[in-house]
Image: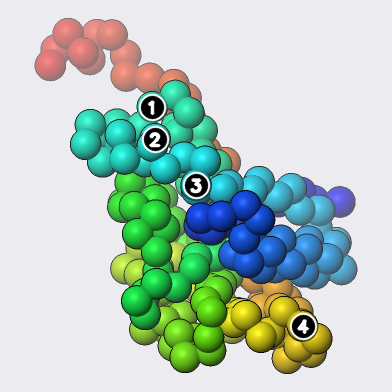
Amino acid sequence: METRTLAVVSAGLSTPSSTRLLADRLTDGVVTALRERGVEARPEVIELRDHARDLADHLVTGFPNAALRPVLETVAGADGLVAVTPIFSASYSGLFKTFVDVLDRDALAGTPVLLGATAGTARHQLALDHAMRPLFAYLHATAVPTGVFAASEDWGSSTELTDRITRAAGELADLVAARPTTAAPDPFADPTPFEALLRG
């Protein structure tokens, strides 16, 4: 069975958080959908709240520290991404945007992405299409057609939320299963000959 890496980014600020809960449900859905397609998924969950200081340091220094570097490499090297943020003031959270800001420009180019968001009321759900989708389009990522939004009232017994998770997970699984495996570039794989360096 083939194996794919699935990066899961959750920008929830509390523990536990509804954002992480949605990220977990989306991850479970994608893992199940990929298994049905003959692909084994290896999820790598990233809680951005655990790296808030590292992200702030990156913003002011321009370089990731030892704790943040593997996180960025995980996202850049993943075969698929699940990205979930709480919605504040009709847009993604500042923590979520900070993480996106420190990614390399082409880190997500061509990467299939499932977008998710949470908020207290359903009136924030348009942020998926008006804020998150343009952001990932700018990064040249391939966002699946179905985004998943969960308001507080959706956590009871909402079959609509479950159906939406299943549909979005299937869309991401289709894209991940169809693309070749992604390998992080090795900076030492093709070294410049020393003679060429001497010649300038």
Q: Work out whether residue 188 or residue 44 is closer to the camera in this orientation and state it.
A: 44
Q: Which residue is drawn at 39% across and 64% down?
A: 93
Residue 54, numbered circle: 2
Q: Can residue 114 be seen in this view?
A: yes
Q: What element carries label 4?
A: loop
**Numbered mark located on residue 200 in the image:** none
Disc 4 residue type (three-letter)? Gly
Few, some or many residues within 10 Å of mark 2 (<14, 14–19, 20+): some
User: Depth-wise, is mark 2 or mark 1 nearer the camera?
Assistant: 2
Q: Do the residues labelled 4 and 1 touch (CB within 8 Å)?
A: no
Nearer to the camera, 34 or 183: 34
Q: Where is residue 160 in the image (x, y as percent from the top left)?
A: 73, 91
Residue appearing at x 87%, y 68% in the figure = 36
Residue 30 in sight in this render: no
Name the kind of residue labelled 3 in the image. Arg
Disc 3 to disc 4, C-alpha distance? 26 Å
Q: In this view, does 99 lie to the left or right of 181?
A: left
Q: Is mark 1 on a helix, strand or loop?
A: loop
Dividing the image into 4 quarters, which one contains the C terminus? top left
Q: Residue 65 carries which label?
A: 1
Return the x and y of residue 123 as percentages of the image width and height.
47, 91
For the residues carrying marks 4 and 1, which lies nearer the camera in this image? 4
Q: What residue sits right under mark 4 in the picture?
A: 156
Classify mark 1: residues with Cα within 10 Å, few (<14), some (14-19) or many (20+): few
